[in-house]
Image (spheres, grey):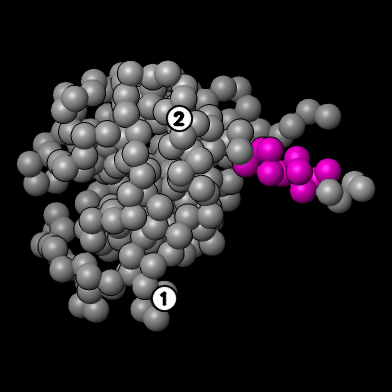
């Protein structure tokens, strides 16, 4: 039976602060060039570093594409490896965004739980991506930084009931090239989609018995 194509949305961020060229958006554009194979319908978006834009855009992406997975990519000046974030946080948003705004409540979703975990096992993804033999390092984290990255991840996890992933990349050249970052994203997405497919096959198999 021919498997239907999967819809995947990947976002990167626009410029902010000292990141005049945001490595996350460069990496996402590299991924778009590489593609994810014929069976994956890949859509990419550049997200402004603004809380209000994120509040509008993330729900819209879910409604418009109904993707099986959304992956958000952000840059971290502290990262030296490709970092898979396990969870997003609801509170603590004090830093002003590009439009000099921050939420009055300092939170993402009023009344939402403090922490939302991705339903995708980042430890397994990290292990498998590391085993792919790329010349990049992968690691996992539970703190996405309480700025637009964390805010976007929480909003997306809230909308998707956990079917989101957030990946932090280092700034360009510290140490990786754009091509290396794009290839790393491609490997991570292949690993996630393989795992999702295996678990679906398992469910279908269980139903058939």
Residue bearing mark 2: 129
Is 172 located above or below residue 89 in the figure? above
Residue drawn at x 28%, y 54% is 144
Q: Quadrant of residue 102?
A: bottom left
Query: Magenta region, mostly helix, strand or loop?
Result: helix
Q: Residue 138, image x and y in percent?
A: 35, 33
- Whether residue 62 is visible: no
Residue drawn at x 7%, y 41% is 18
Is 167 located above or below residue 64 in the figure? above
Within 10 Å of the Cα at label 2, are there few (<14), some (14-19), or many (20+) other Cα atoms? Answer: many
Q: Residue 190, image x and y in percent?
A: 53, 30
Residue bearing mark 1: 112
Q: Quadrant of residue 84?
A: top left
Asked whether 176 or 6 is in front, the reply is 176
Q: Is residue 5 left or right of residue 178?
A: right
Is residue 200 covered in magenta? yes
Q: Is tag 1's residue or tag 2's residue first in the polypeptide sequence? A: 1
Could you say whether the residue bearing mark 1 is in a helix, strand or loop? loop
Asked whether 103 or 63 is in front, the reply is 103
Is 55 located above or below residue 84 in the figure? below
Q: Which residues are magenta?
A: 196-205
């Amino acid at each position: 039976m021919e498997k239907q194509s999967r819809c995947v949305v990947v976002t990167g961020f626009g410029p902010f602060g000292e990141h005049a060229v945001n490595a996350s958006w460069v990496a996402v554009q590299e991924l778009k060039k590489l593609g994810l194979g014929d069976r994956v319908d890949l859509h990419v978006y550049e997200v402004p570093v603004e809380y209000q834009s994120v509040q509008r855009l993330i729900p819209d992406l879910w409604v418009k594409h109904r993707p099986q997975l959304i992956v958000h990519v952000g840059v971290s000046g502290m990262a030296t490896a490709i970092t898979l974030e396990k969870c997003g946080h609801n509170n603590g948003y004090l830093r002003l965004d590009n439009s000099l705004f921050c939420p009055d409540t300092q939170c993402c979703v009023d009344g939402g739980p403090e922490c939302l975990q991705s339903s995708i096992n980042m430890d397994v993804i990290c292990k498998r991506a590391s085993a792919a033999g790329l010349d990049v390092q992968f690691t996992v984290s539970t703190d996405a930084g309480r700025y637009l990255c964390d805010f976007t991840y929480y909003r997306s996890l809230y909308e998707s009931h956990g079917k989101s992933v957030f990946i932090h990349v280092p700034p360009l050249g510290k140490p990786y090239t754009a091509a290396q970052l794009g290839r790393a994203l491609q490997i991570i997405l292949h690993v996630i989609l393989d795992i999702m497919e295996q678990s679906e096959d398992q469910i279908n198999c269980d139903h058939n018995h």
